[in-house]
Image (spheres, rainbow, N blue to C red):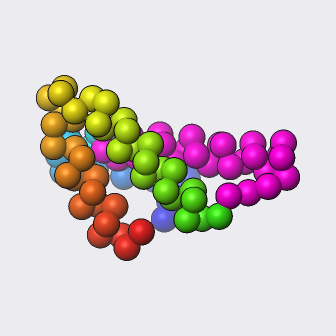
Amino acid sequence: MFMNWSELLSWIRASPSRKLTLLRKLATQTVVFHLWKQRNNLIHNQTSNPPASFFYGIDKELRNIISGRRLRKPFRSLMMLWLRSFSSRGV
C-alpha cells in the first residue's frame, strides 16, 4: 500500500526490469483512470460499481492496451507478465 505519490513513483521506478517498469506504469495509469471513473459515477449518478466490476474493468482495459500494441517490441511478452502478476494476487 502506498501512502503518497512519492512512494508510488518509487515503486514504479524500482522494478528490476524495463518490462516490469512499463507494466507498472500501465497498471497505475489504468487504476487511476478507473478510480476517476468510479468517482465521477458516484458524483453524477449517485451509484457505484461493485469491487469485482472495478477490477474486471482494470484487467480488461490493461489486456486491451497490451493486445493493441503486442507487435511493438516492449509489449511482446507483457501479456504473460500481466497475467502472472494479476493471477498471483488471487483476483
In the visual, does 91 lie left or right of 55? left
- In the rendered view, would you say 87 is above or below 13? below
Give whichever of 25, 86 is nearer the camera: 86
Residue 74 position by quadrant: top left
Is residue 24 highlighted in magenta? yes
Specify start and end residues of the magenta stretch as a single range: 23-49
Q: Residue at x 42, y 69 (%)?
A: 91
Residue 7 percent location from the top left of the image: 45, 53
Residue 13 percent location from the top left of the image: 31, 44
In the visual, does 57 lie left or right of 86? right
Give whichever of 26, 87 is nearer the camera: 87
In the visual, does 62 lie left or right of 38? left
Is residue 34 highlighted in magenta? yes
Q: Residue at x 51, y 58 (%)?
A: 55
Q: Residue at x 22, y 33 (%)?
A: 70
Residue 32 percent location from the top left of the image: 55, 44
Residue 79 percent location from the top left of the image: 24, 47
Main secondary structure of the magenta stretch: helix
Give whichever of 66, 5 is nearer the camera: 66
Residue 76 position by quadrant: top left
